[in-house]
Image (cartoon, grey):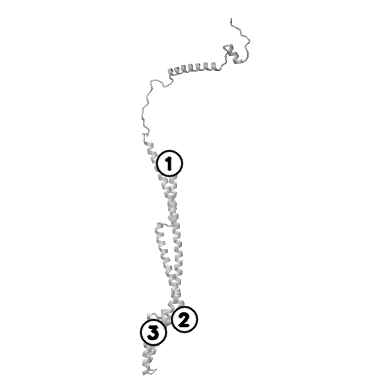
Amino acid sequence: FDDQLKSLRIRLEEAQSKLTDYQQQERVVSTDERLGTETARLQNLSTQLVSAQEATRNAVTERKKLQEVLASGVPLTTFEPVFDNPVVQTIKAKIRDLQGTLVNSSNSLGPNHPQIKKLKSELYAARQRLDAEIKTITDGIDNAAELSRERERDLENSLDAQKQLVLDLKNERNTISVLQREVESAQATYNAALTALNTTSMQSMVDQTNVSIVDRATVPRKPASPRIMVNLTIGVLGGLLLGIGLAVLMDVFVRKVHSREDLMNELGVPLLGHLKKV
């Protein structure tokens, strides 16, 4: 037991050392908690990537529509993002007011009148602001498409890196689980051997055994064997019966001639004569 406990203790210490060295080498404290956090981040990145892809498709579609409008020669003020822009609508309304005022003033004032020149100057400035605002909108559409593509690429790279991180954490958790099972197995084996040793040691210290006397043996007053009188009686009866049996057998099987009739019957030849005892 001592030798076995020593080897089992060494095995347990080696398993614990492997687990500790791996945790220190990989700087792992709580794999499950970190894995849960990184998995949640992976899901969040995946959701953001889906949203970014949708935004990229919308931005690319918007830019494609803008290019079609530019190619067709239609005024950009009819383009929906420009047409629905509140700043553009405000500037267009001001331009219409200035144009109306200019038309009304031109009926009564000459072209070189200061008020006419002022209205023309304000009208020119309003048109410049309208062109600048339209350019800002169109540039924003182009920039939005490029920025959306760039964000989508960044999210894809981040998602790939996060996937690799989650896979590495899963591998770490699997490795730690194997090492922990080895430690638990070695600990259980060591505990079982230690329990058996303690039980054996306690049993060896107890003087009383589990054997008890049921009936005490007594010394017989006479021997059980040999029984002389019985053996003599059996011998006499057996010898008598054996002698009678032998006599009967000899009388039956041993051929004897007691008279001439026995001789004639036995040999089957005629009798010529016999001698009488004098």
Q: Say which residue appears at 45% left-offset and 78% top-offset.
A: 65
Does residue 11 sit above or below 78 in this rendering? above
Pointers 1 and 3 in contact (C-beta within 8 Å): no
Of marks 1 and 3, the one in the foreground:
3
Q: Position of residue 47 (x, y in %)?
A: 41, 67
Does residue 155 sit above or below 211 in this rendering? below
| Residue that lies at the very extreme toward the top in this rendered image | 278
Q: Quadrant of the N terminus?
A: top left
Q: Position of residue 179 (x, y in %)?
A: 44, 52
**At numbered mark 3, what does the secondary structure look like: helix, strand or loop?**
helix
The amino acid type found where label 1 is placed reads: Asp
Give the alpha-carbon distance from disc 1 to disc 3, as whole Å: 100 Å
Pointers 3 and 2 in contact (C-beta within 8 Å): no
The image quarter in which residue 207 lies: top left
Identify the residue position indicated by label 3 in the image: 92
Q: Quadrant of the C terminus?
A: top right
The image quarter in which residue 125 lies: bottom left
Q: Is residue 237 left or right of residue 274?
A: left
Sequence-wise first label, 1 or 2: 1
The amino acid type found where label 3 is placed reads: Lys
- Characterize the local packing of mark 3: few (<14), some (14-19) or many (20 or more) Cα atoms within 10 angstroms: some
Q: Say which residue appears at 44% left-offset and 42% top-offset.
A: 4
**At numbered mark 1, what does the secondary structure look like: helix, strand or loop?**
helix
Residue 65 in view (yes/no) = yes
Sequence-wise first label, 1 or 3: 1
Identify the residue position indicated by label 2 in the image: 70
| Residue that lies at the very extreme toward the front in this rendered image | 270
Identify the residue position indicated by label 1 in the image: 2
- Nearest the eye: 69 or 263: 263
Does residue 270 sit above or below 140 in this rendering? above
Sequence-wise first label, 3 or 2: 2
Residue 114 in view (yes/no) = no
